[in-house]
């Protein structure tokens, strides 16, 4: 908590809508910032993939500054054969995730956070592992807004509860 008080005003403004967990993430992943029309994307990041795992994740905060809802309907990356939009939820004590068949709505004037244990992008059919420090381009396809290409900064594993939970999440679902 003390640490957070030392941050700059600009940082606090850009991160003030995030949860406590995400503020920690925001400190590390603050370099990615993209905007097109009414859509703003911040804090785009991913994780290194373990050897032999053809799946990676994509997290970010998407803000819709417009007066109309916008739908994230698809995403693609030159690094992945396919990118899905997933939601993770708790079901009878088990984490499970499923594709959002109709995309992810970003309500007018609101932010949606793609984060561990929640909405995320699933980078499938990776030909090469995602390595810490890499920046992975992902094109976001919006219905009601312009496409935006963002770069997921591959952040190191470990250190937070978020990391632990997410890893379990994906190994449970895909192996
Ligand atoms: Cu997933």
Image: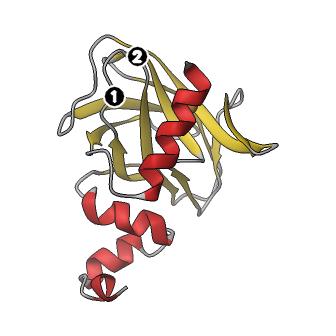
Q: Residues within 10 Å of mark 1 (few under 14, many from 20)?
A: many
Q: Nearer the viewer, residue 138 or 38?
A: 138
Displayed quadrant of residue 101 = top right
Is 51 located above or below residue 111 in the figure?
above
Q: Which badge, 2 or 1, comes first in the chain's sequence?
A: 1
Compared to 4, does 169 lie above or below? above
Q: Alpha-carbon distance for marks 2 and 1?
A: 8 Å
Circle 2 sits in a helix, a strand or a loop, which is it?
loop
> Which x, y percent locates residue 103?
65, 33
Mark number, residue 86:
none
Tell me the residue at 22%/55% (across/down): 31
Q: Is mark 2 within 8 Å of ligand 1?
A: no
Residue hosting label 1? 49
Local packing at callout 2 (Cα closer than 10 Å; few below 14, some 14-19, many 20+) is some
Q: Which residue is mark 2?
A: 54
Marks 2 & 1, CB-CB < 8 Å contact: yes
* 38, 125: nearer the viewer: 125
Above or below, 20 relative to 155 = below
Q: Secondary structure at mark 1?
A: loop
């Amino acid at each position: 908590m003390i640490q957070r008080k030392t941050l700059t005003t600009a940082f606090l403004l850009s991160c003030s809508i995030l949860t406590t967990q995400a503020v920690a993430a925001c400190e590390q992943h603050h370099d990615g910032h993209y905007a097109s029309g009414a859509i703003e994307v911040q804090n785009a990041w991913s994780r290194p993939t373990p050897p032999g795992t053809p799946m990676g994740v994509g997290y970010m905060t998407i803000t819709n500054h417009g007066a109309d809802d916008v739908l994230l309907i698809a995403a693609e990356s030159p690094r992945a054969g396919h990118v899905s939009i997933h939601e993770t939820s708790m079901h009878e004590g088990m984490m499970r995730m499923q594709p959002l068949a109709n995309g992810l709505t970003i309500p007018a004037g609101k932010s949606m956070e793609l984060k561990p244990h929640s909405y995320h992008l699933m980078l499938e059919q990776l030909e090469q592992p995602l390595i810490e420090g890499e920046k992975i381009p992902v094109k976001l396809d919006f219905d009601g807004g312009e496409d935006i290409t963002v770069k997921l900064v591959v952040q190191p594993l470990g250190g937070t509860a978020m990391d632990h939970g997410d890893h379990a999440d994906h190994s449970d679902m895909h192996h």
